[in-house]
Amino acid sequence: MAVLVDQNTRLIVQGITGREGTFHAKGCAEYAKQFGNDLVVGGVTPGKGGTTHEGWPVFNTVEEAVKETGANATMIFVPPPFAADGILEAAGAGVPLIVCITEGIPTLDMVKAWEIVKRSKSRLIGPNCPGVISPGKAKIGIMPGRIHKEGSVGIVSKSGTLTYEAVYQLTTRGIGQSTAIGIGGDPIIGTTHIDALKLLNEDPQTEAIIMIGEIGGSAEEAAAEYIKANVKKPVVGFIAGQTAPPGRRMGHAGAIISGGEGTAASKMAAMSAAGIHVVKSPAEMGEMMAKVLGKA
Amino acid sequence: MASQAGGMEIEQVAHDTPEKIYKEYVEPATGLQPWQARQLAFKLGLDAKQINPAVAFMMGLYKAFIETDSTLMEINPFITTKDGDLLALDCKINFDDNAMFRHKDLKELRDLSEEDPLEVEASKFALNYIKLDGSIACMVNGAGLAMATMDIIQYAGGQAANFLDVGGGANQEQIENAFAILLSDPNVKAIFINIFGGILRVDVLATAVVAAAKKLNVQIPIILRLEGTNVEEGRKILKESGLKFEVGATMKEAADLAVAAAKGGK
């Protein structure tokens, strides 16, 4: 099963002719190909419609690309000043899954875009995220495919490299993953911790979940409440930024402790109270999951 | 948001007596509406003749907020004079770094003398650096892993000297820049490099680290935790460099080594 991305995903790439877009379109296509899946079907770069790029057809608009290729997902590598517009174009074309990798989109652009996207039929992952991977099937994003292994642990995380860290700790212990979802570290994101948890909770392939959060906002506290009320699968949790100074933005736009809120301590306490197996050290995520699954 | 109980410790007011903070939620599509500003003005207990000026003030504030891509605009204190006039006596504004490309005028107002010199230097090289008080400098790719690296150092009994996200393109030049910044902090006793090279090749990274360390003549211990393709070749390069490198197999092992090295250097 897995969620969001699988053997049936047909992906277009917005910004496919750019350096990043090209590199990662190839990465995604090659990853899916190992498992016999034809993932990437084309791309969009306004003004370059009608040409081909690395063998893929390029279209001027998302609408045209969807019509011609039957794509059901898009991956966005459009530069920050234009990325919110790219998200809106994808939602306007009715693409079911929009994964926006772009980092550095102005917050007010996303506030407006999200108002539209949340009322549309599209699901948005990100922005400022590594994307989504269902190991053994396909990936939409910039994560290194080779560290993953197909299996039963679902992952939801605000942070890219920390997700890779969790995946690596699982894979080296022989524990595979169902789907790893990078939801992004911006203040305004499409799919939240709760949305991702809901998907993983309902996925029959997923037997346990790792939830990785970081300082700032209160999404982790809300997710803990949700888990307590709805999730019967075991959850292992980690919060990055336990030693972060208040009032400083730690790399991600949303990672800031302000007015005494959004601290790691508050999130970890809420998560523990919800029955989540919270680890203090980022090195213990895999070990704790092994213990929870009885594989330690 | 508005409150009569302003002044100091507004967080405490919000916590103890949330009913004293009046909130209006803005629809992004329509923006702040006059009725919302009016409602806030009445709740603040202003006189009838002060309502219209207060509404005009709040509508103007909202317009300024949107047009400057602010993330915060805080007027404190906002006073009424003996004659009944409304005055803003102070204002704090935070701008959205991500939107500065469309506000060149605001960018020019930046006063570098108000910022930490090392952070200013780092920002020139697109390095995301925040100075802290510990003795173990960190160089990490990715903001989440960079925070987690600070956490694991504390867990191992040490303290991080900084937060540093070198981003995805950790090439030799970028590593040299990062070393230079880390080394100019006199508290630093050891350097912990934690790179999860998804796409990066470890041998390429190791070569860059060796070259940068040699060029800058780094004398303090460097502890690495490198993950990615060609790990073995990478380790060999580090071993044969003749420099004081230590490599941890896992994040925990590397953190322990870094803490031991920093303590040994005292």
Image: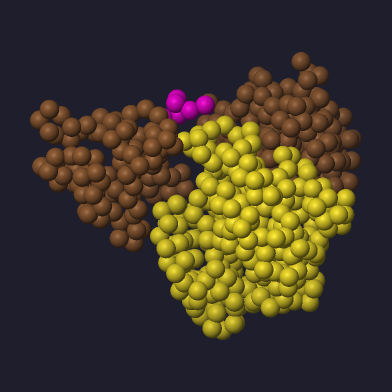
Q: Going by the image, does A81 lie left or right of A270?
A: left
Q: Is residue B214 above or below residue B265?
A: below
Whether residue A286 is situated above or below residue A126 in the rendered picture: above
Q: In the current view of this chain or complex, which residue is farthest to the top?
A: B266
Q: Is residue A174 above or below residue A60?
A: above
Quarter of the N terminus of chain A within the rendering: bottom right
- The residue that appears at 42% across and 57% down in the rendered structure is A111
Residue B79 at x, y = what percent? 22, 31
Query: Residue B145 appears at what percent x and percent y?
Result: 68, 43
The chain displayed yellow equals: A
Question: Looking at the picture, does residue B71 appear above or below residue B190?
Answer: below
Q: Which colour denotes chain B?
A: brown
Q: How is the image coloured?
A: by chain
Number of numbered discs overlaid on the protein picture = 0
Instruction: State whether residue B107 appears in this view.
Output: no
Magenta segment includes B25: no
Q: Position of residue A17 (x, y in %)?
A: 58, 66
Given residues B32 and B168, the one toward you in this image is B32
Answer with the quarter of the image where residue A109 lies: bottom left
> In the rendered view, does B60 fall on the left or right side of B240?
left
Q: Which residue is pictured at 71% across the width and 30% down the height?
A: B154
- Report the residue at 75% width, 59% height from top: A208
Residue at 38 percent of width and 48 percent of height: B69
Q: Which residues are magenta?
A: B111-116
Residue A184: x percent and y percent? 58, 54
